[in-house]
């Protein structure tokens, strides 16, 4: 299980680096799918099979498909690729990249030694019982948030006449 | 099943979060910035699940479900805004949004 964790973590990190650095949007999306699947495996090794299944179904399934639809609608071609190459010159990324690295080193330094994860998986039944027991109000608020997102996306996505 | 140290899952979450942060800072294309935000949300959700596994409580996974709902709502509105931006300005450059200044 430990071995699976390290392999999946390495795959997730490598795929995420590729997502951030790819020029072609579709290539970046494919690496994003790989990264999300690797994180799902990490979740499974951490004893959260329900979260792993949700990660595959919702992130790798629904959200990435949404991205793919948008990339199809944008219909980016070679011009966008050249523009992307121009934008991603070392001059532009070295500064923010170094600053993010400093923050990461600080964060890793703050993390002290911790006791190990308790073995054994947490079943979907326990998660469901907690979700519809103690966290019922949170579920209702999440449903309102999703409704607001739906209405907002519907409103923004509708075709309007020019100048309005 | 061998016990994993919690620290290493948190280090993985921190690394993924930093990569997403670097993506938001470095890329000028709004599409990539949205993808990087997804990576950052995913990293925080991973940290929640790892902490939940440490104490063998389902609460971590409950928070994971909430982060998932948040990410879905965020990406729906974000991509709708992106399409609107592309339709109006003909570019995905985040700097083009500076024209929104009043």
Image (spheres, coloured by chain):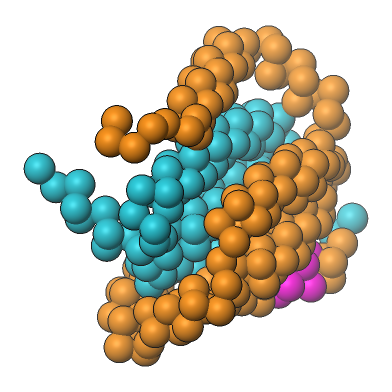
Q: Main secondary structure of the magenta part?
A: helix
Residue at position x 66%, y 49% in the image: A69
> Which chain is assigned cyan?
B
Q: Is residue A61 left or right of residue A123?
A: left
Q: Position of residue A156 (x, y in %)?
A: 44, 32
Residue at position x 37%, y 67% in the image: B28
Residue A9 part of the magenta-drawn span:
yes
Residue A62 part of the magenta-drawn span:
no
Q: Is residue B2 above or below residue A11?
A: above
Write down the region rendered in magenta.
Answer: A5-11
Which quarter of the rendered picture does the N terminus of chain A lie within?
Answer: bottom right
Q: Is residue B79 above or below residue A106?
A: above
User: In terms of depth relative to the viewer, which is nearer, B95 or A16?
Assistant: B95
Residue at position x 42%, y 31% in the image: A160
Q: Colour of chain A?
A: orange
Q: Position of residue A40 (x, y in %)?
A: 77, 53
Q: Examine the rendering and report whether any part of residue A130 can be seen.
A: yes
Q: Position of residue A7 (x, y in %)?
A: 79, 73
Q: Point out the residue furthest to the bottom here.
A: A90
Give residue A9's quadrant in the image.
bottom right
User: In terms of depth relative to the viewer, which is nearer, A132 or A92?
Assistant: A92
Give residue A8's quadrant in the image.
bottom right
Q: Is residue B92 left or right of residue A116?
A: left
Q: Is residue B17 above or below residue B70?
A: below
Q: Examine the rendering and report whether any part of residue B53 can be seen.
A: no
Q: Position of residue A52 (x, y in %)?
A: 79, 45
Residue at position x 39%, y 61% in the image: B91
Which quarter of the rendered picture does the C terminus of chain A lie within?
Answer: top left
């Amino acid at each position: 299980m430990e071995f699976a964790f390290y392999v999946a973590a390495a795959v997730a990190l490598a795929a995420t680096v590729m997502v951030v650095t790819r020029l072609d949007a579709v290539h970046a999306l494919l690496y994003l799918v790989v990264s999300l699947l690797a994180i799902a495996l990490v979740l499974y090794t951490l004893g959260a099979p329900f979260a792993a299944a949700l990660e595959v179904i919702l992130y790798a399934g629904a959200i990435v498909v949404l991205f793919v639809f948008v990339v199809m609608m944008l219909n980016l071609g070679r011009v966008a690729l050249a523009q992307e190459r121009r934008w991603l010159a070392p001059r532009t990324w070295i500064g923010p990249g170094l600053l993010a690295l400093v923050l990461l080193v600080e964060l890793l330094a703050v993390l002290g030694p911790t006791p190990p994860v308790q073995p054994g998986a947490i079943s979907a039944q326990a998660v469901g019982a907690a979700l519809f027991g103690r966290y019922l109000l949170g579920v209702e608020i999440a449903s309102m948030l999703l409704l607001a997102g739906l209405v907002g996306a519907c409103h923004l996505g509708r075709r309007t006449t020019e100048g309005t | 099943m061998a016990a994993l140290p919690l620290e290493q899952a948190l280090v993985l979450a921190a690394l993924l979060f930093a990569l997403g942060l670097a993506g938001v800072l470095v890329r000028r294309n709004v599409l990539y910035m949205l993808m990087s935000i997804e990576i950052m949300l995913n990293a925080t959700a991973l940290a929640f699940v790892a902490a939940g596994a440490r104490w063998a409580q389902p609460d971590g996974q409950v928070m994971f479900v909430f982060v998932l709902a948040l990410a879905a709502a965020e990406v729906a509105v974000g991509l709708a805004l992106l399409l609107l931006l592309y339709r109006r300005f003909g570019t995905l450059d985040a700097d083009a949004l500076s024209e929104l200044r009043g």
